[in-house]
Image (spheres, rainbow, N blue to C red):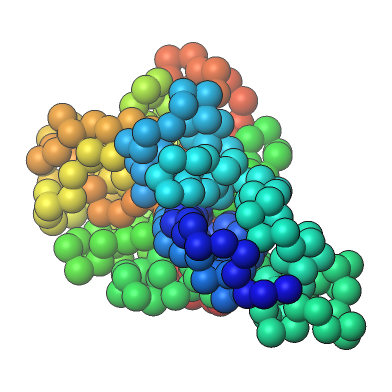
Amino acid sequence: MSASTGSSSFLCELNGLLRDPHYHRCRLLLQELSILHPQFLSKLHGMIEQEYLDYVRTTALPHDVKQRHLQHTGPFFLVSQRTHLADEDAFIAFAIEKTQRSRSDILVAAAFGAQNVGSTTYAAVDAEEELQIKAEAAAREALFRYRQVSGNEHVYLLFAIDGQTLPRVEIELFARICPRTCANFVAFCEGIVPDISDESSMLSYKGNYVHRVVKGGWIQAGDVSQGPNGHGNGPLRSLYGMGFPDESFAVSHDQIGIVSMANNGVPHTNGSQFFITVAPLPWLDKKKVAFGRVVSGLTTIHAIAALETVQERPCVPCKIVDAGRLNEL
């Protein structure tokens, strides 16, 4: 078969999450197909979660399509800015129609390279497995590369609701803007903050409960001074002893997933408590010190925010079961 079956070109915009293997499957399918058929022009938009959600909200899509992508955050294609292809299967069907290639050819190209289409060495069943392996490796590498290029520290929090562990929350810290605030947060994630009331004991976010959920606002945790069951009214504790001053108000609370310091309602009373926004809250600017953002795991934050509460305290236990730095591939 010739490399091209027609003169019409198709600008195929692929949108998805950098951390999602499904996005990288679609990317490999599109990139190798464009080698076989140059009329398939590729434009790749690999994003972190908030960027993806903002893109979907502001892109002209049918309402039901928009809601589906906001809920499931899967990869999708826009062809020549007109045709929406909802997922990998829809793209393969489109490619088969336009090129008269078989599904096997398209999978082999994505998994083993366009140059191996037609070779008897590769079969579609092997291509499916190889494509998945490549996509999973690419997802890990892409997120690692994002962390490296950002130049920022990244940490993780692992939450459990009533004993059920949720997808990991990964946070990018703006250490160049708020170095002391970020160092404080990292130290609590790693559990290396000496308790000033007993310096043989180390304070940590691990085991700490989410003690406050403000509907339409934020989730709050980190009251480590009273053990894991702090209610948010404990004495200040930090890497620097007790409280420490407001460092910078340069980061706005204008997005979902902003990580910020909770204080005592007056300036310069930062300690261990933090909150994560579930809505844009710009009215908090210059009142609270924002120092990071969630880059993966917003579904977990929204699940916690949806918990039933009494006086803003979750009715079922929700705690941080693990936390630490992110530096692995």
Q: Nearer the viewer, residue 163 or 1?
A: 1
| 196 sits to left or right of 106 | left
Q: Position of residue 171 (x, y in %)?
A: 41, 56
> Which residue is outermost to the top?
310
Residue drawn 36% across and 69% down? 153
Q: Position of residue 124 (x, y in %)?
A: 85, 68
The image quarter containing residue 61 is top left
Q: Nearer the viewer, residue 79 or 323?
A: 79
Q: Nearer the viewer, residue 313 or 196?
A: 313
The image quarter containing residue 154 is bottom left
Residue drawn 69% across and 84% down? 115
The reply to whether residue 132 is visible in this rendering is no
Residue drawn 43% across and 49% down? 80
Count how many numbered circles sit on residues in the image: 0
- Is the residue 29 above or below the residue 242 in the image? below
- Is the residue 249 above or below the residue 154 in the image? above
Query: Which quadrant holds the C terminus?
Result: bottom right
Query: Which quadrant holds the N terminus?
Result: bottom right
The reply to whether residue 144 is visible in this rendering is yes
Q: Nearer the viewer, residue 240 or 255?
A: 255
The image quarter containing residue 193 is bottom left
Q: Position of residue 128 (x, y in %)?
A: 80, 66
Q: Position of residue 92 (x, y in %)?
A: 68, 54
